[in-house]
Amino acid sequence: METFISKQMRPAYGFDEVAIVPGDYTVNPDQTDVSFQIEDETFRLPVVAAGMDAVTDPSFAAELTAAGGLAILNLEGLHGRLEDPYSAIEAIAHEPDATVTHLMQEYYAAPIQDDYVARTIEAIKDKGGKAAVSFTPLNAKRLGPVAAEAGADYIVVQSTVTTARHYSKSPNGLHFEEFVQQIKVPVIVGNTVTYSATLELLETGVAGILVGVGPGSACTSREVLGIGVPQVTSTLDTSAARDAYEKQTGRYVPIITDGGIRTGGDVCKSIVAGADAVMLGSMFAGTQEAPGHGYHWGMATPHAALPRGVRVYAGTQTTLQRLLSGPTERTNGTENLIGSLQTAMGMCGATNLREMHDAQLVIAPSIKTEGKQLQGS
């Protein structure tokens, strides 16, 4: 009889399936340092706002800069396409669920305008914010020079899955080595979830890596495409590539876990898994400072042929200050994310994020339910 060998699978884990093991000694939370670096610049807080129209506009970017984090504005969104993006955001926020995707497809069909791109970057800078702006690989060669000329501080080349090697009909596709050298602005690239793809991207000279395919609350790529790897495993694998690259070259490149984070506990698990910062979408969308009126939608939601997102309602339920640093009366970890991180670091004996990388994780599918039968009853 012929021997049959099936394709092998390995386990992969998300936030609810793992737990952090406390350390052998502890430190005071107020003695912990939660800052992270992108090349030569240090950010006081390891938080990055997602490049989504309901989350980041020039005012929000300036607010988060002042708070110590970094916000990314999507130049392929409404700010890069429309003279008045706020009217469109208002209309999307109030459109019925049955027709909102079609409405978005109409708005996002407008062509990207170079002068709107420059105007948006200038608005962020005028308000005192760091101008981190994003676009997909398809438009990188066109919009990169425009953004750099307008004064962008960081350029993010982002798509659902980004690799260093992409094959297409174009004889002269995007080559990140050339792009990084040409732009002369720190380039952050994503998204990826594997060791090998991350290592190849690092070798092109990029300044940061975004990690995660499909975990966001407004994203449906996992349902539509069936593609994705749970965030803890993704972060473990990509950060291992970062560490191998640093060992080979002496250059440290931050890993930013992007999507699926709902609580301070998820932030802490991301850092222990190897992240240097986390990217938040729906949590920021729920702040008073966000432009989306409590709604949130992903970059792939208005795709003309294959939408891979949905408008969700986060509700306007907090402020940027309370979300990041409290004070809070909530007991579910959805405010004071930095306080959660500092407390966890103290329990693990970590004084900075790189020491927190050394904390242990265990597979613990009952971590949120063990002994909790009275909660919520």
Image (cartoon, grey):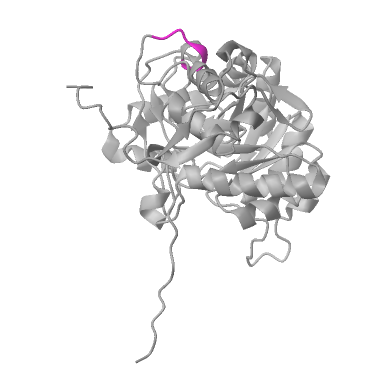
Question: In the visual, does 275 lie left or right of 185?
Answer: left
**Residue 258 appears at what percent x and percent y?**
53, 38
Q: Residue at x 78, y 36 (%)?
A: 185
Name which quarter of the figure residue 367 lies in: top left
As displayed, is residue 158 above or below residue 151?
below
Answer whether residue 142 is visible to the viewer in this image: yes
What is the quadrant of the C terminus in the image? top left
Answer whether residue 51 is visible to the viewer in this image: no
Question: In the visual, does 230 lie left or right of 161?
Answer: left
Per the rendered image, the range of residues in magenta is 323-328
Which one is in front, 377 or 85? 377
Which one is in front, 68 or 133? 68
As displayed, is residue 154 above or below residue 287?
below
Which one is in front, 133 or 146? 133
Q: Residue at x 60, y 40 (%)?
A: 112
Farthest residue in the front direction? 24
Q: Residue at x 79, y 29 (%)?
A: 40
As displayed, is residue 296 above or below residue 238?
above
Which one is in front, 227 or 58? 227
Name which quarter of the figure residue 116 lies in: top right
Farthest residue in the left direction? 377
**Residue 84 appears at what percent x and percent y?**
53, 26
Name which quarter of the figure residue 171 lies in: bottom right
**Residue 239 appears at what percent x and percent y?**
62, 44
Q: What is the number of callouts on the image?
A: 0
- Residue 370 lies within the magenta run: no
Question: In the visual, does 233 lie left or right of 331?
Answer: right
**Residue 307 appears at what percent x and percent y?**
41, 49
Q: Residue at x 63, y 57 (%)?
A: 196
As displayed, is residue 173 above or below residue 360?
below
Farthest residue in the bottom direction? 1
Question: In the visual, does 161 lie left or right of 37?
Answer: left
